Amino acid sequence: MSIAGTDGFADALADLDVTLVRTTEADAPGAIADLLRGDTVGVEPEFAALPESVNTDPTREEIETADTGVTPAALGVAEFGSVLVHETGRGEERASLHPRRHVAVLAASDLEPDLNAALPRIAEAASSTGSAVLTTGPSATADMGGLVVGAHGPETVAVVLVEDA
């Protein structure tokens, strides 16, 4: 992804009130730790280590009551500031949707410029396990009147963009 694409991703995230932290693989645990709030559950990305404080083997109850969930993002869509959480059987979906705060960890090489470029990878992820969630910012609904944030997912979202070596 070009610098322009990365900057576009940053702009889209800012418009969604999503925190973006750019870091290196070596500094990722510290960058992630700075974003954690309260009890934290997560799934370790293959490309970055999680802080030791993240519970990577939580019970169902611990997931449902966690303050923060940390997951790898399979890809990002720069145009919209979206991230794809691909459920691989390690609990990514639950850890991204149940806690009040979601921290998505994305490799810079997995950032696509737009939805058209991302669609083949989204389809592949969804067909491989049957579950992939493309999220754009915090959960929000206005089904019952005024805007409610966090009704169907996290109230706040942060993305840790891990620059490739």
Image (spheres, rainbow, N blue to C red):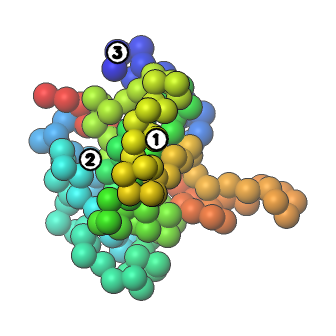
Asked whether, in this view, residue 145 is left or right of residue 4, the answer is: right
Q: CA distance from mark 2 to mark 3?
A: 22 Å
Q: Residue at x 26, y 47 (%)?
A: 31
* Res 22 → quadrant: top left
Mark 3 packing: few (<14 Cα in 10 Å), some, or many (20+)? few
N-terminal of the pair, mark 2 or mark 3, is: 3
Label 2 residue SS: helix
Q: Are marks 1 and 3 in contact (CB under 8 Å)?
A: no
Query: Which corner quadrant holds the N terminus?
Result: top left
Mark 1 packing: few (<14 Cα in 10 Å), some, or many (20+)? few
Q: Is residue 1 above or below residue 142?
A: above
* Res 61 → quadrant: bottom left
Q: Is residue 28 above or below residue 100?
A: above
Q: CA distance from mark 1 to mark 2?
A: 30 Å
Asked whether, in this view, residue 97 is left or right of residue 152, the answer is: left
Give the amino acid type for the residue marked by disc 1 in the picture: Ala
Give the amino acid type for the residue marked by disc 3 in the picture: Ser
Q: Residue at x 51, y 39 (%)?
A: 82
The residue singled out by tag 2 in the image is 31
Asked whether, in this view, residue 55 is left or right of residue 67, the answer is: left
Give the amino acid type for the residue marked by disc 2 in the picture: Ala
N-terminal of the pair, mark 1 or mark 2, is: 2
Q: Is residue 7 at all visible to an observer of this figure?
A: no
Q: Residue at x 50, y 52 (%)?
A: 133
The residue singled out by tag 1 in the image is 123
The residue singled out by tag 3 in the image is 2
N-terminal of the pair, mark 1 or mark 3, is: 3
Name the front one of labels 1 and 3: 1
Q: CA distance from mark 1 to mark 3?
A: 23 Å
